[in-house]
Image (tube, grey):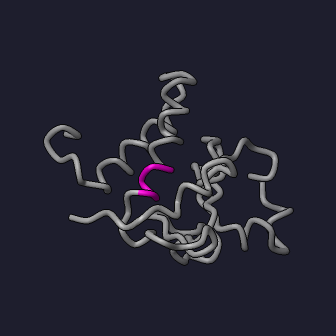
Amino acid sequence: MIRKYPNDLLHYHCLAEHYLKSPSYGDEVYNFAVQLLEDLLIRDERNQHLEVEDIFHRAFCAECFKIIRGVRVKCVDARCGYKDRCLGCMNGPTGALDPCTNHHRIHIPRQGRQSTLRLPRIQS
């Protein structure tokens, strides 16, 4: 599918989510999934020339039900359903009570990749 539709960002997003939810693939595929989610942010034309706190994700916050902007916090524990949260809800008053605070979470984009989001607009 990727070879057939190389510019379909939604397909890449679904593939990355699948890899994150399948621990049987191993650490290499898990790291590839995180990298793929970060690369999607860069390739999405809505995110060109934006600061990190303004970037759009293709995910909704499980708490406030808004489209996640800025850093996306994803719990990768199957017990809570791989929930996505915005930083505002994760750091808010109910965030400390959330069971995800004890689970492994990833931040998208990771701290080291945040500077790569400000790339020149890609000409089509």
Report the number of discs. 0
Instruction: Give above or below for 78 relative to 66.
Output: above
Determine which quarter of the picture holds residue 42: bottom left
Magenta stretch: dominant secondary structure: helix
- Determine the residue positioned at 23% across, 53% down: 7
- Determine the residue positioned at 62% across, 43% down: 76
Q: What is the x, y in percent for residue 24?
A: 51, 22
Determine which quarter of the picture holds residue 114: bottom right
Of 97 and 18, nearer the camera is 18
- Determine the residue positioned at 53% across, 42% down: 34
Of 85 and 79, nearer the camera is 85
Residue 39 highlighted magenta (yes or no):
yes
Instruction: Give above or below for 26 relative to 17.
Output: above
Q: What is the x, y in percent for residue 94?
A: 81, 71
Viewport quadrant of the C terminus: bottom left
- Determine the residue positioned at 85% across, 74% down: 93
Of 117 and 34, nearer the camera is 117
What span is in magenta? 38-42
Residue 82 highlighted magenta (yes or no):
no
Determine which quarter of the picture holds residue 10: bottom left
Q: What is the x, y in percent for residue 56?
A: 49, 70
Instruction: Give above or below for 96 relative to 25.
Output: below
Of 67 and 94, nearer the camera is 67
Q: What is the x, y in percent for residue 105?
A: 69, 46
Viewport quadrant of the N terminus: top left
Instruction: Give above or below for 71 relative to 82.
Output: below
In the picture provided, is 10 more to the left or to the right than 124? right
Residue placed furthest toward the left: 4
